[in-house]
């Protein structure tokens, strides 16, 4: 059996329902951050195959509003790996369900820490050659 390359990218799809929006019908910023954090968690978990937690969220830029009824695709990419940490860039795109029109709406970076069974930071195995 051939070894499987360690995945560095994870994609997550969500739909924006009315309970995700504010009085203007646009996605709450906190909901966007929650979805982005979840995508970062999944990417870091798949990469490390360890329990991970969020240690830090860095600059998050909101470019365009996300409207009720739009689909969003979150693309989370592990961009660097430290001893126990992984830096994950997350880009969130809006997509119109009926036309397929897409636009980058939000981008941010999250630092995830790998934990052992005692919930202490543990090394992330280096990539296999």
Image (tube, rainbow, N blue to C red):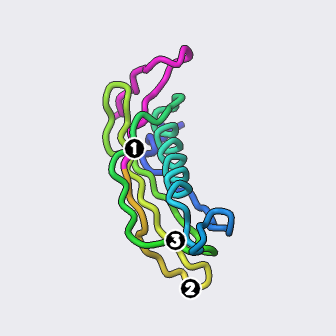
Q: Which residue, given by chain and number where applicable, does mark 1 sit on?
A: 57
- Given residues 66 and 114, the one toward you in this image is 66
Residue visible at 43% across and 20% down in the picture: 122
Check contact, mark 1 vs mark 3: CB within 8 A: no
Q: What's the CA distance linking mark 3 and mark 2? A: 15 Å
Q: Which residue, given by chain and number where applicable, does mark 2 sit on?
A: 99
Residue visible at 61% across and 66% down in the picture: 21
Q: Is residue 42 left or right of residue 110?
A: right
Q: Is residue 13 above or below residue 26?
A: above
Q: Residues within 10 Å of mark 1 (few under 14, many from 20)?
A: some
Q: What's the CA distance linking mark 1 and mark 3? A: 20 Å
- Most extreme residue toward the bottom is 99
List x then y, in percent, for residue 31: 56, 56
List x then y, in percent, for residue 39: 51, 49
Q: Marks 3 and 2: which is nearer the front?
A: 3
Q: Residues within 10 Å of mark 3 (few under 14, many from 20)?
A: many
Residue 115 included in the magenta stretch of the image: yes
Q: Is residue 115 above or below residue 100?
A: above
Q: What's the CA distance linking mark 2 and mark 1? A: 33 Å
- Most extreme residue toward the top is 118
Q: Earlier in the sequence, mark 2 or mark 1?
A: 1
- Residue 111 location, quadrant: top left
Q: Which residue, given by chain and number where applicable, does mark 3 sit on?
A: 66
Magenta stretch bounds: 109-129
Check contact, mark 3 vs mark 2: CB within 8 A: no
Q: Earlier in the sequence, mark 3 or mark 2?
A: 3
Residue visible at 50% across and 47% down in the picture: 37
Q: Marks 2 and 1: which is nearer the front?
A: 1
Quadrant of the drawing holding the C terminus: top left
């Amino acid at each position: 059996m051939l070894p499987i390359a360690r995945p560095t990218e994870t994609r997550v799809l969500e739909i924006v329902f009315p309970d995700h929006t504010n009085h203007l019908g646009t996605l709450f910023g906190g909901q966007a951050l929650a979805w982005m954090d979840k995508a970062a968690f999944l990417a870091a978990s798949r990469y490390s195959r360890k329990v991970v937690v969020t240690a830090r969220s860095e600059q998050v830029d909101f470019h365009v509003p996300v409207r009720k009824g739009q689909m969003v695709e979150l693309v989370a990419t592990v961009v660097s790996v430290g001893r126990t940490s992984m830096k994950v860039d997350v880009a969130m795109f809006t997509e119109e369900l009926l036309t397929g029109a897409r636009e980058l709406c939000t981008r941010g970076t999250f630092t995830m820490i790998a934990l052992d069974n005692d919930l202490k930071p543990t090394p992330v195995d280096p990539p296999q050659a």
